[in-house]
Amino acid sequence: MSTDADHGAATVRHVVHIRLEPTLDLAVRDALEASLQRLVREHPHALTGSLHRDLGRRPQAPVSATWMVVLDFASMDDFEAYLAHPLHQDFLADHQPSMAYISAIQVPIG
């Protein structure tokens, strides 16, 4: 098993799961999705970004996510810069209250 100390200079993968309640107002959902698409498309400080939508098989299940976001960063410093970037900060300020949950994990890659 590796430790955090082993990953100082490693490329960092940031994976986020976002869940919206299926009953969330469509206008709120559409605005959130448009902002999320912009955030992933522009992926400030990241090497790459991708957005994946759940297939919708069981959206009412409490463990189902609506989206998965994957962003890869050249370094932890770049990831930290992304967290502080206005596009990321504004996305969270504008949309986090509409989310049923958001969870994230960062792992070394490469």
Image (cartoon, rainbow, N blue to C red):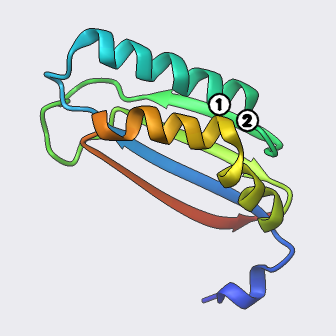
> Where, by quadrant of the figure, is residue 80 drawn?
bottom right
Q: Are marks 1 and 2 in contact (CB under 8 Å)?
A: yes
Q: Residue at x 53, y 22 (%)?
A: 35
Report helix, strand or loop for mark 1: helix
Kind of residue sitting beneath label 1: Val
Residue that protrudes farthest toward the top in the picture: 27
Picture coordinates of residue 58 (x, y %)? Answer: 17, 31
Residue position for label 1: 40
> Pointer 1: residues within 10 angstroms few (<14), some, or many (20+)?
some
Q: Which mark is residue 63?
A: none
> Is residue 45 shown above or below 54?
below
Q: Position of residue 13 (x, y in %)?
A: 68, 56
- Residue receiving disc 2: 43
In the picture, measured across the screen, residue 53 lies left or right of residue 106, that is left
Residue visible at 56% across and 30% down?
A: 51
User: Where is residue 101 shown, x and y percent of the image?
Assistant: 29, 47
Q: Residues within 10 Å of mark 2 (few under 14, many from 20)?
A: many
The residues tagged by marks 1 and 2 sit, at their Cα atoms, a distance apart of 5 Å
Residue 70 picture location, percent across and down: 61, 43
* Helix, strand or loop at mark 2: loop
What's the residue at 82%, 70% (across, down)? 10
Instruction: Reply above or below: 63 against 8.
Output: above
Instruction: Locate the C terminus and report the quarter of the image it occupies.
Output: bottom right
Query: Amino acid type of disc 2?
Result: His
Residue 78, by quadrant, is: bottom right
